Image (spheres, rainbow, N blue to C red):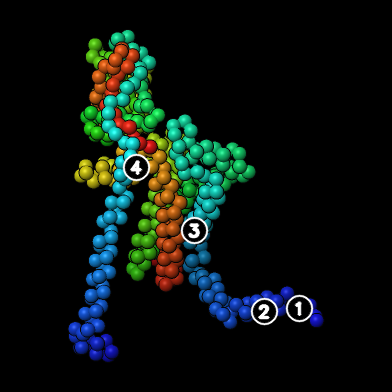
Amino acid sequence: MADAAVRKRGFTRRTFLGWWIGSLMTATIVTALPPLLVFLWPAPPKGQRKGPLTIALDTPMDQITDGQAVKFSAPTSPNSAFIMADGGGGNAAGDLAFGGFVVKNQGKINVFAINCSHLGCSIALNESAKTFDCPCHGSRFHLDGTVLRGPAPAPLSHLTWKQGSDAKTIQVDGLTLGF
Amino acid sequence: MAIPHPREIQMAVVNWLDERYPFTKAVDESLYQRVPNFANAFYYCFGGMVFILVAIQLLTGVFLSFYYVPDAGTPGNSPAYNSVLFIQNTQYLGWLIRGSHFWGANILIIMVLIHMSRVYWTGSYRAPRELNWIVGVIMLLCILALSLTGYLLPWDTKAYFATEVTIRIGGLTPPAQLGAFIRDVLQGGPVVGPPTLQRFFTIHVFLLPGLIVLLMYIHFRFIRAHGISEPL
């Protein structure tokens, strides 16, 4: 019965104040939430910058024979990574890679990022079969980067590179991570 | 002065406490509940086993955190990895604490699935207990998230690439921009690296354990409110 009495009184000063305070609290929370969500999104660290990374190859460029693949890694002091030039599957242009392969196949040189196009594990050279094998889920790639066996859905990603000052070095587009 | 009987000391202490807060009543109400005959079966114990396993995880987790260092360091010199080696090989009983945490986590998931199967089998999810099923499913997701985040913490090759794979799966969420956002937020940067370890550590050690303890409390309050479900 008390409820009915309150309801009958309709819109009172107390109702107004209740809605007023409720709206203020809602507005406060709604205003505070977006910046907190942005806080979760990492800002690039101070030392982070793009630029070509100079890589010394184990085998000079002019001595790589047909069907040979030379592995190289991104510098670790400071920590750096290569930037993929193209993508497909789990890789996308602009994604980062911590290593790569220089491959000579039928006279053509390719530089691939080390990440499998399935879910990004590091592929390894299978010397006897002349393929790149992924240890995680068994994908295999031809030396030209195309898929020999799934689950990888797309060819390997390329890295943007140019010859360095001598045959032993190459310049690969990369990112100094800043951490 | 006569030496008081231990029973008298006990009564004095309990009475002193009870005059200030009804502890006896609270303990009686929470512990001395009659279990219905139909619930006197081993398959009604799986939930309790899950609870005990979670308690073991919390306890061994706190012990591990005394020695674990959540710092990825630099390639070839990782305090996180070294601290796990220290726990495993050097610290007294470290192998046991870490082994319990590892195997407890594995058994926990199995027990959770068995517990859920029992709830499904006996139809205990039906009205009015749907909310408790929902809370339970959220706890299942919490436990899976705990497993995922905990897997990275040793910071070895297996941990690294397992996390690379799982974050990539999250990153495949359509549309591509949302996937990239999820990946960046989980990774804490453009790659799986030291910021990822930091994030996963915080989620594993602070966020999810707090959440799961809260949800377990709600879960048990629901059970008390509804009573144990009758068999079909």
Q: Are marks 1 and 4 in contact (CB under 8 Å)?
A: no
In-front residue for pair B119/A159: A159
Q: Are marks 1 and 2 in contact (CB under 8 Å)?
A: yes
Label 3 and label 4 in one chain: yes
Residue ID at (24%, 90%): A5
Going from the N terminus, do you reach mark 3 or mark 4 first?
A: 3
Label 1 and label 2 in one chain: yes
Secondary element under disc 1, as helix, strand or loop, is: loop
Whole-angstrom CA distance, mark 1 to mark 4, is 64 Å
Identify residue for label 2. Answer: B12
Mark 2: amino acid:
Ala
Going from the N terminus, do you reach mark 1 or mark 2 first?
A: 1
In which quadrant is the N terminus of chain B drawn? bottom right
Chain under callout 3: B
Whole-angstrom CA distance, mark 3 to mark 1, is 40 Å
Label 4: how many residues lie within 10 Å, few (<14), some (14-19) or many (20+)? many
In the image, is A129 to the left or to the right of A91?
right
Identify residue for label 3. Answer: B51
Q: Are marks 3 and 2 in contact (CB under 8 Å)?
A: no
Task: Evaluate whether residue A152 shows in this view.
Answer: no
